[in-house]
Image (tube, grey):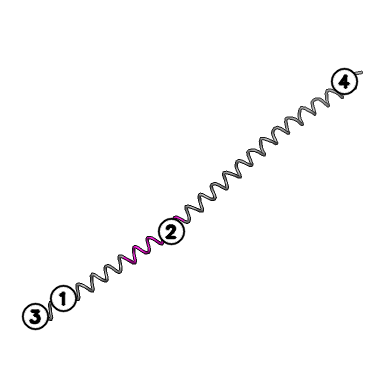
Amino acid sequence: MPADKTVEMALSELRAAVGSLENAVDARIERQRENRDVDGEVRRVHADRARLAQELDQSQFRANRLEEVNREVSRRLVTAMETIRAVLDR
């Protein structure tokens, strides 16, 4: 084999290898970019979850407080009705 052909073949193989390496690097960069996007989305989901959990806790507290107030109002109404009946019965 002539030396020119061997050098040309080696250069051709080198170009192919460099092309493959560039493709691999591009693919790696794209995967890293996608991973950053996914990581950002996961952080946003966790922040939303924490916010929603806090809102749920606050809503539950308000619901419990309203339930207590409702019981107190009901108790007072019963007392008022009993007082009115007692006055009317006299």
Of mark 3 and mark 1, the one earlier in the sequence is: 3
* Residue 45 image offset from top left, x and y in percent: 51, 51
Q: Is residue 84 left or right of residue 74?
A: right
Identity of the amino acid at label 3? Answer: Pro
Q: State the CA–CA distance, disc 3 to disc 1.
A: 11 Å
Asked if the residues shown at circle 4 and circle 3 are in contact, with their CB atoms under 8 angstroms apart, the answer is no
Q: Is residue 2 left or right of residue 53?
A: left
* Residue 61 figure quarter: top right
Q: State the CA–CA distance, disc 1 to disc 2.
A: 40 Å
* Residue 63 figure quarter: top right
In magenta, the rendered stretch is 25-39
Asked if the residues shown at circle 1 and circle 2 are in contact, with their CB atoms under 8 angstroms apart, the answer is no
Q: Residue 89 magenta-drawn?
A: no
Of mark 4 and mark 1, the one earlier in the sequence is: 1
Image vertical order of residue 49 relative to residue 8, above or below:
above
Name the residue tied to disc 1: 9
Circle 3 — which element? loop
Q: State the CA–CA distance, disc 4 to disc 1.
A: 113 Å
Name the residue tied to disc 3: 2
